[in-house]
Amino acid sequence: MNSAVNPNEVITLWPEGAPGSEGWKQVEGETILPPGLKVVRNVTQPSLTVYSAGPAKANGTAVIICPGGAWHFLSIDKEGTEVACWLAAHGVTAFVLRYRLLRTGDNLIAEVNENLSDRTRMAGLMQALQPLIQADGQQAVRLVRQGAAE
């Protein structure tokens, strides 16, 4: 990872609140999973973190990065910030998307294992969450396109 590249800005996708999850009360947080994987959980306010290429390297392209995590968390470093820093160092402005996720409690690993081991349960959870994640992705694309001249 190129530590010389730092995030420039965080853009809230839905300043008036994310539609469809207005009543969500979970608190977003970071957790370290074995063997040292930093993840973000319980996203309720989706956002884009901007990693700009320096003026000398910027080539006019942009990418939105959507870190994975089985709908339960975002692998924010390995699949987010590290990728964004590499891209920015190579001239591409990168946006790391924090999108809405399944609510998780204190025992993240057990919850992930329980949900993923029951295909019917997981399908129901995904069916309810998928439109919200899709809306977050579409809003991210709209915002990046609107700010393309910047």
Image: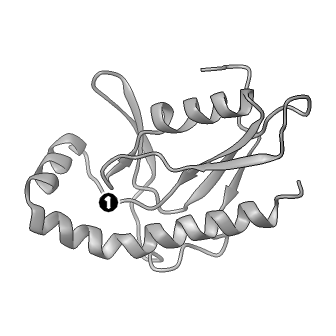
In the picture provided, is 44 more to the left or to the right than 33? Answer: right
The quadrant in which residue 8 appears is: top right
Give the x, y percent position of residue 36.
Answer: 35, 22
Q: Which residue ends up furthest to the bottom in the rendered image?
A: 20
Q: Which residue is mark 1?
A: 103
In the picture provided, is 69 more to the left or to the right than 138? Answer: left
Q: Report the colour scheme.
A: one colour
Give the x, y percent position of residue 131.
Answer: 41, 75
The amino acid type, in three-letter code, at marker 1 is: Arg
The quadrant in which residue 26 appears is: bottom left
* The C terminus sits in image quarter: bottom right
* The N terminus sits in image quarter: top right
Compared with 40, 143 (above or below) is below
Q: Secondary structure at mark 1?
A: loop
Give the x, y percent position of residue 34.
Answer: 27, 25
Give the x, y percent position of residue 5.
Answer: 73, 27
Which residue is at 9% across, 53% downward? Answer: 117
Compared with 147, 107 (above or below) is above
Report if residue 85 is visible in the image.
yes
Which residue is at 35% across, 70% downward? Answer: 129
The quadrant in which residue 124 appears is: bottom left
Report if residue 13 is visible in the image.
no
Q: Nearer the viewer, residue 47 or 79?
A: 79
Which residue is at 31% across, 52% downward? Answer: 72
Compared with 108, 139 (above or below) is below
Q: How many residues crowd around disc 1 within 10 Å: few (fewer than 14), some, or many (20 or more)?
A: some
Q: Nearer the viewer, residue 119 or 10?
A: 119
